Amino acid sequence: MGTHENDIACPLIDMVRERSLRIRNGRKLMDIVEATESEVEEMRAEVEQIEAGLAPGTDGVFGEGIDVTLCALDAVIQENPNRSNREILAKAAEKLDKWERDYSDKVRKDR
């Protein structure tokens, strides 16, 4: 369970936090951002394959999307290892509300 006594459990955040804090290789936040960018490019390649009518690669959008998510959570945790699960989930809820509000009527009508 999270890093604070009264924190809430979130298996995904807890799993990423445990692994993230075990890695002791001198990496910096920018290293994590670069890894995230690489994973986004791999996800883009998967989407391009699917949109071209080709079979997805081994990981597919599913696996690459998970990689992007894990990298992003790794950055959040590395930036402040003491941030609670409650704080992370509250920010996620805030961002989801914004996504829904800002994008629900803007489904790329320019395409």
Image (cartoon, rainbow, N blue to C red):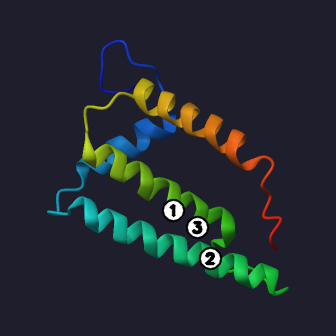
State how far apart marks 1 and 3 are (Cα): 5 Å
Q: Is residue 53 above or below residue 74?
A: below
CB-based contact (under 8 Å), mark 1 and mark 3: yes
CB-based contact (under 8 Å), mark 1 and mark 2: no
**Residue located at (25% from left, 38% from top):** 81
Which label number is shown at residue 67?
Answer: 1
Q: Amino acid at mark 2?
A: Arg
The residue beneath circle 2 is 44
Crowdedness near tag 2: few (<14), some (14–19) or many (≥20) residues, C-alpha within 10 Å: some
Q: Amino acid at mark 3?
A: Glu
**Residue located at (20% from left, 63% from top):** 27
Direction from residue 47 to residue 88 in the image, left or right? left
Q: Is residue 68 above or below residue 34?
A: above
Which label number is shown at residue 64?
Answer: 3
Q: Is residue 99 above or below residue 33?
A: above
| Badge 2 element | helix
Which label number is shown at residue 53?
Answer: none
Name the quarter where the N terminus is drawn: top left
Residue in the foreground of this view, choosing between 75 and 97: 97
State how far apart marks 3 and 2 are (Cα): 9 Å
**Residue located at (71% from left, 76% from top):** 47
Q: Is residue 27 above or below residue 10?
A: below
Direction from residue 23 to residue 60 in the image, left or right? right
**Residue located at (65% from left, 77% from top):** 58
x%, y% of residue 18? 33, 42
x%, y% of residue 17? 35, 42
Q: Amino acid at mark 1?
A: Asp
